[in-house]
Image (tube, grey):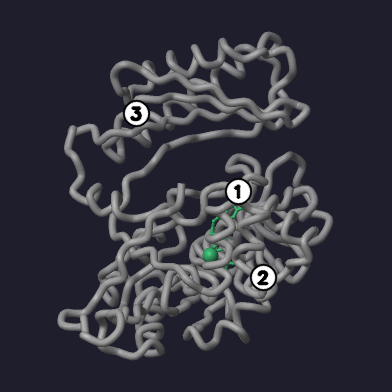
Amino acid sequence: MCPKLDPVPVPPGAAAASGPPEAVARRIVHLDMDAFFASCELSKYPELRGRPMVVGGRRAAHQPRLREDGTREFSLLRDYVGRGVLTTATYEARTFGVHSGMPTMKAARLAPHAVLLPVDFDLYRSYSRRFKDAVRTVAPVVEEIGIDELYADVTALEAGAQEIAVRLKAAVREATGLTCSVGIAPNKLLAKLCSDLEKPDGITILAMADLPTRIWPLPAARINGIGPKASARLAELGVATIGELAARDQVWLVERFGRSYGRWLHRVSHGVDERPVVTYSEPVSMSRETTFERNLHAVRDRAELGEVFTRLCEQVAADLQRKGYVARTIGIKLRFDDFRTVTRDLTLPEPIADAKALRRAAGSCLKRVDLARTIRLLGVRASALERADGAVSEPERQLAIDFEPGPEPSRQD
Ligand code: DCP
Ligand code: MG
């Protein structure tokens, strides 16, 4: 299926007799917070400013302790034992080569003296709300795309791009004390690519004419939608950068990646992206998962496993209820000691949001898995969500005319 594109917006009276109507040049912002989780933590522990610090510890083990003299004692990475991964690192810690998603034990070898803090999602969610509200005071047409990033359509604002970027950063800083990086470009694709170019605390303004100098030298994998498999295949074909992708013929790409993905690759490499900024979206699913400190066995560790399983179901139920949703499909995810991952799900006749019902549905999914091996990770997911109050959200209409970000999977993916 080929992604549907919205018709290009046409200004009133622009349908001139000669030639096709001209598209309105859009101005799209991508704003991404700098070292987000770590920066939120720094506002709690200002004495850590300037020091390498990572976030990824466990609350019980790595919570800073208050000494008698009022100073705090922090855990260091070198004392970490376990199987967690880092959520993020301050820019000072990144100079040692540590980064998001890195196993914490590996990071400990690279930066043993870095401070390790436990994750505090409630704190990050509250900062997330604050910075997004601050952005809306400057640029009201906002699409939230993650805890620390958003798009805004600022086409209608009168100020110049530089001034908009400065105002956005000032508003975010005033509301949160934190810095962010802003990219402004003619579409979402380019805005997202360019907000990363001057990180941290950066402003990057990009016009279509800057594509060859600023975008084409970047690795193709920087484009959202070119995943590890597609970029490995591209590398085999001698394509490493976005520019090398742009130099290939569309027919050549379609022959190798299929019609839909091949055309999409061609479009994005030329900086073409007509997705609108969508100011509202419904969540697709809600899930919680946990990696155990040691692998658990379904029979030998039955009590412990059961306890964690019930807690995950309670958390998903609480998420659903807090956000006002019910779910028709309940699923589980298991990762075994050999890293094999399996999922099972169950679609119910009536949607649910209650922890006990969720636990029952998830439990019946678990019965369909061979549990001979020990388990590393367990997750519970609620999908096929509906609004609990039965309301049909007005923006569904809007979603129907949007297309999913990125491509459909290619034959290779
Ligand atoms: N995150 C995570 N696990 C990952 C990547 C990110 O938990 N593998 C979390 C922690 C980050 C937040 O999401 O702080 C935002 O992700 P970003 O990729 O924007 O990374 P940062 O904001 O930390 O750094 P940057 O300054 O590069 O944006
Ligand atoms: Mg960020």
Say which of marks 1 and 2 sits in front. 2
User: Looking at the rendered structure, which numbered label has been put on residue 410?
Assistant: 1
Foreground of the two, 252 or 245: 252
**SS at badge 3:** strand
From this view, report whether residue 353 is shown above or below residue 51: above
All told, the count of numbered labels is: 3
Dot 3 beta carbon under 8 Å from ligand 1: no
User: Looking at the rendered structure, which numbered label has been put on residue 205?
Assistant: none
Residue 193 percent coordinates (x, y) = 54, 72
Mark 3–mark 2 distance (CA, rounded to whole Å):
45 Å
Instruction: Inspect the image, locate mark 3, and give the three-letter code of the amino acid beneath it.
Output: Ala
Kindly identify which residue carries mark 3: 327
Of the image marks 1 and 3, the number of the one nearer the N terminus: 3
Instruction: Inspect the image, locate mark 1, and give the three-letter code of the amino acid beneath it.
Output: Ser
Instruction: Inspect the image, locate mark 2, and give the three-letter code of the amino acid beneath it.
Output: Arg
Q: Quadrant of residue 113?
A: bottom right
Q: Quadrant of residue 344?
A: top right
Q: Residue at x 31, y 65 (%)?
A: 142
Kindly identify which residue carries mark 2: 248
**C-beta proximity under 8 Å, tags 1 and 3:** no
Q: With 208 as the anchor, is 378 left or right in this view? A: right
Of the image marks 3 and 2, the number of the one nearer the N terminus: 2
Residue 153 percent coordinates (x, y) = 32, 72
Q: With 239 as the anchor, is 173 left or right in this view? A: left
Q: With 315 as the anchor, is 233 left or right in this view? A: right
Dot 1 beta carbon under 8 Å from ligand 1: no
**SS at badge 2:** loop
Of the image marks 1 and 2, the number of the one nearer the N terminus: 2
Q: Quadrant of residue 72?
A: bottom right
